[in-house]
Image (tube, helix red, strand yellow):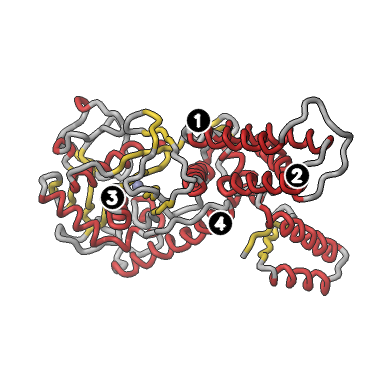
Amino acid sequence: MRRTLSLFNTLTRKVEPVIPVQEGRISLYTCGPTVYNYAHIGNLRTFLFQDLLKRTFRTAGLQVRHCMNITDVEDKIIRDSQGALPADASNDSRHAAMKALTDRFTAIFLEDLDTLRIQKADFLPRATAYLPQMIRLIQDLEAKDLAYVREGSVYYRIAGLPQYGCLAHLDREGMQAGASVDADEYERDSVTDFVLWKSAKPGEPWWDSPWGPGRPGWHIECSAMGLELLGERLDIHSGGVDLIFPHHENEIAQSEGSLGHRWVNHWVHGEFLMVEGQKMAKSLGNFFTLHDLVAKGVDPIALRYAIQSNHYRKVLNFSFEGLRAAENSLRRIRAFRKRMEGEGQAGSGPWKETLEPLARLGQAREIFWAAMADDLNTPEALAAIFTLISDLNAQDDHVALTREEREEVLAFLDETDAIFAAWPREALSLDAEVEALIEARRVAKATRNWAEADRVRDQLKAMGIVLEDRKDGTVGWRRG
Ligand SMILES: [Zn+2]
């Protein structure tokens, strides 16, 4: 059965049903990471929200074709990769230094996705592999008089596009026609012509172009890759709210300026994240990457749940207390799953009003999907699961559910886990087994039984489990 889902559309500021251009098939573009550092949990919140979005469509019976770009050339990447090179370094060595940095952080980013059970996109294009497409797109904008050259750089002429400002709901009066900026990011109060191609400055890697040596601006990267890989009409384009302006506004200007028609039907943005009530900042000591949290012993799946159990359009206040609450919620769902996997005990007979477990289950499923279909209302959807758990636990205490009823309940847990990825069926027993082996290894090491410790490590290795000794002395693990 295929369900229709509705999402808040930043373009119209309304919750609207998503009707795909091709029936049953969603095309989804999400702005990926700029790979010059570890992703912090604010970034990861956006990727977790998009994973929820994608999994919900898939579980609702639609196909999703997803493209997430990897930005591997950009102002901050150049700043961080070129410092160690001499002033007269060759262009090749400048490119090599940039690639070394972005390769390293791309690999770390993909590992983070695995750790958080975020499904990889069908396309993960690196911007530097799409230079010809970017150059062609800029040439096309030039031909349409939407771009102009100034001192070897090319700028977008925003006055040439009537719909410029439609996404960020800008006041066109306030725009500064003719003023232009080179930076990839700028403030909303300076709406100006933005850069498409930047002429090479000393100390920067460059590519050849019809305008001389230079490199692409950040915004053109997404338009070129999105158009190339997902086509001229996109169902959903998504990112964090910080990307609405200028990045997404500029993407619309580039793509629609070239196409001459609407590019994206639904623009969907996730809100940002605070830490313990404060804005996350390195200077406040509340800046966390996934690696920081894992080193503190945080279970990544509890983090996943803590983030996804909040509505994506509300500012999320991340806290360690919230993480503990998430762990408790997960424990409750997993214990219920275990109970349903087992056989019921003979209870004390009929209880209060007798409840029809399958009817109750049907009701929970209906409430769950109505909530998810209404702009991904995860708090309500999860509440439906917890009410079901309370009701069926109480019922099972008195009159055991039959095997058939238990299987139906387990199927619903599978269905909801396909979205939340936090209470899987088979992994539970494997998790318990791995934990037991890790404990056995800890005991062997503590008792200086090195042969036994090595044997257990090999056994875990054969199971495809990679151990990670943490700074605090505990041992983490992941599937290798
Ligand atoms: Zn983008």
The CA distance from mark 1 to mark 2 is 30 Å
Residue assigned mark 2:
335
Q: Are marks 3 and 1 in contact (CB under 8 Å)?
A: no
Q: Quadrant of residue 5?
A: top left
Instruction: Give the number of the mark in front: 2 or 4.
Output: 2
The CA distance from mark 2 to mark 4 is 25 Å
The CA distance from mark 3 to mark 2 is 46 Å
Residue assigned mark 1:
314
Locate the C terminus and report the quarter of the image it occupies: bottom right
* Residue 143 horizontal side relative to residue 70, left or right: left
| Label 4 element class | helix
The CA distance from mark 1 to mark 4 is 25 Å
Amino acid at the residue labelled 3: Ser
Amino acid at the residue labelled 1: Lys
| Label 3 element class | helix
Q: Quadrant of residue 322?
A: top right
Amino acid at the residue labelled 2: Ala
| Label 1 element class | loop
The CA distance from mark 3 to mark 1 is 28 Å
Does label 1 point to a residue whose CB lies under 8 Å from ligand 1? Answer: no
Q: Nearer the viewer, residue 259 or 68?
A: 259
